Amino acid sequence: MKGGLYFGPPGWAPMEIEGLSSVDKEAGKAAEALPEDRQALIGLLESIGLGKTNPTLPSLAEQLHELGARRLRALVLNLLPTQPEFALSAALSEAAIQDVLAGLDAIQKHVHARRIIVAVDRHDWRLRRSWRRANRARQYVITKLLNRYPQAHPTMLIWTLFAKRLPVGRSPVRVNRMIIDPVTCWALGRYVRRGERFARRPVQVFAPSRAHPDPRLVLAEIGESLSLLCERLRIPLLNRQVIVNGLLSGEEVDPVHFRVGPDTESITVRDKLIAERPSPCFACGWCVDVCPTSLNPVNLLDLAERAQNAAGGTDTPAIGALLHTREAKESLHCVGCGLCSYVCPTRLPLTQQTLRLRNWVVSAEQAS
Amino acid sequence: MTSLAKLNPPAHQPSAPFIVWPVARREFYLSIQFALLPAIVFAVVVFGWRVLAMLICAEIAAITMHAVLSRFTRRGKAMIYTHTTSAVVIMVALCEPFWPTWLVTIAAGLIPCVVWLIGGTGRERIHVAVVWAVLLQVVTTQMAYRTGEEHGSAILARDRLVMGDIRNAKDAPLYHWPVSSELGGDDAVRIALPQQVACESFDEISQTLRETEIRPDPTDRTRVLPPTTRAALQAYLDTVLSSRLPAIEMLIAGFVPGRIGCVCVPLLILGGLYLAYRYILRPKSVLLFLGAYGVGTAMLLFWPTAIGHLGLLGMWGAAKSMAGELVTLLEYAFFNSDVLFASIFVLALPGTQPLTRRGRRVFLVCAALLAAMIDRLNAGNLPAATASLCVFMPAAPMFDWMFAKRSWMSRGF
């Protein structure tokens, strides 16, 4: 990966996950055996509620379904933080590594991958230490990667590890590899070891206050309203902005209507900021330098603007022709990491317009 | 490039990313000024108060004009002060210390006007300050030619640093750094530009080689030069290096005549390191530009007629016999030119080079080769690297279009 931006390991020490230790001490049910049949396993995953646990990754059931009867070349456990300052992988590896290992072994029993790769952040020594200890009795390949954001994105991970091009939004099974995130392993491990359904998931909560200056890792009920969760955690929401799944590529949500889902990784509550007004591009080239897929975001912004202007007028064939150009189709390779807008000194909405152009191109291709 | 006027309203809706890098346009230009500051301060020490006066007058003129435009016009409100002030600093850094202050002040006052005319900060495809510096060079050369007033190149005497007048200069027969009493009380010593001396030496060597008689049928084709010619060249080079050029440490430290911001190599490198640390300068671009310039200068060292006369093998043998002296002369030509300044501060300015990696590489190699050619033909009379970048800057989007690779994701599908 040529672009990306290195943020370093989290600037705070990951604590234990609130609520997890007490759950661990409870006497669980007897260990559950997973069905041998692939379809039965997929059905079981759906019945225990183990769906998509990562916003950029297809669920385990989807990947198993796509795999079919093929032999998997590699099973990758992605422990890289999906956003800067995320410490979920490290905390799970510290607090519940036995569950994660049990889940990983259970998946391997079904897919029979030739090798299991554990991708860890090169600079996260706690994580590396936990996995070095755990790997003494196993044969996992622990690969230390420089976590330049968005290295954890499946497309980037497959490129870095195997030099294979995985189209954005496609399942890694397409290139005969499977990527799973630690939460999936942890949830499956809990089912295998204790027979527990996936009803709660660890969520990282960023809401700096005097009592909790650092982020917190909590177990949140899946389906729980965000306002209730914040009330439980004593986080005031009045006149504050709530962002789900990271500041770089997440989305702003309404806390009353939004419910914690299986793929809710983080919640950020902060005071609303006044957005800076964009000014003309002065061609510093930072957006091109950081783009992990070597796009030219400012060029795509121009195309999006032209397409929008054409659509606003009466020239409908013009927008059609524009969206079928090679330049416009480059937007299909945008991973939506948000880095171009993040670094832009003129504050241009590069990511937003590129994603918008991508949607138009997809619509145009489907229509034709 | 994308302009604000073209942006459609929905683009302003808040969405990810919800954080931004703390460097906005203002910090970008401030960093460039901050990096250039040590080199300018050094120039005030070596060239005297006139440089400081020039800088202050130019800044006041530019800021006043900027204030007027931003107060009374709508377009002027979109302009930013740091852009104007950094443009002035860059322009002054490319000026020569004895240029008339009034002329530089007028040019500085015009910078905001031109930026305003072309649509505001960020709309320029060629940086105004850099163009102005090249134009000023042409104007001052013409003025000197008409008035017959020749200041040459000078530095202050050792005991007149900071407070001496650079225009109160006297010729020195030998190249050493005198005190004021050795100059009859004058403040500065007028000496030849090391870059010019180096290029004259290359010309002289080429002339000698072109006119020399080749030894008939030497067994070794690299030794076609007769011993008398070799001895004559060696004696000439010894004279140049011992009496017409300063010590190399003085050249590197910056105690030599030259352009205001271009003389002190360590401070320029320090500024470059700071800019690279702030991600404003791409170190690879600098190295590529300098490397291509070095290769270009080495290729153009001798006249083509001399190479034609001796043949490639004969020329190789001649160059080998005086390799040490040639490398030393190259060092004088390199460090006394504006190439280091241009590769650090002009390339740090946004919009001076293509956006894509491959386009940038081709662009930098082309610009550096042109710079080497200009420098060889017109040593020291023009800021060659800056002028060359000026020529190529408007064509930067074309380099992007012609040479940019598609996304690596596009290939293979």
Image: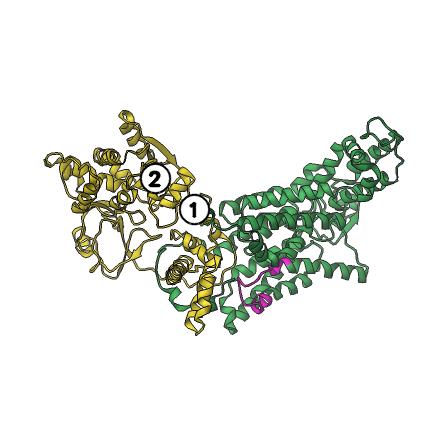
Chain colours: A yellow, B green
Residue B63 image point, x, y percent: 56, 64
Dot 2: element: strand
Q: Residue A177's mark?
A: 2
Residue B348 left/right relative to A144: right
Task: Chain letter for mark 1, please.
Answer: A
Q: Mark 1 points at which residue?
A: A4
In the picture shown, does residue B311 fall above or below A268? above
Dot 1: element: loop
Query: Is the N terminus of chain A in the top left, top right, bottom left or bottom right quadrant?
Result: top left
Residue B55 image point, x, y percent: 62, 57
Residue A313 image point, x, y percent: 43, 73
Q: Residues within 10 Å of mark 1 (few under 14, many from 20)?
A: many
Using the rendered view, name the quadrant where residue B213 is placed: top right
Q: Residues within 10 Å of mark 2 (few under 14, many from 20)?
A: some
- The stretch of residues the image draws in magenta is B112-130
Residue B262 left/right relative to A80: right
Amino acid bearing label 2:
Arg
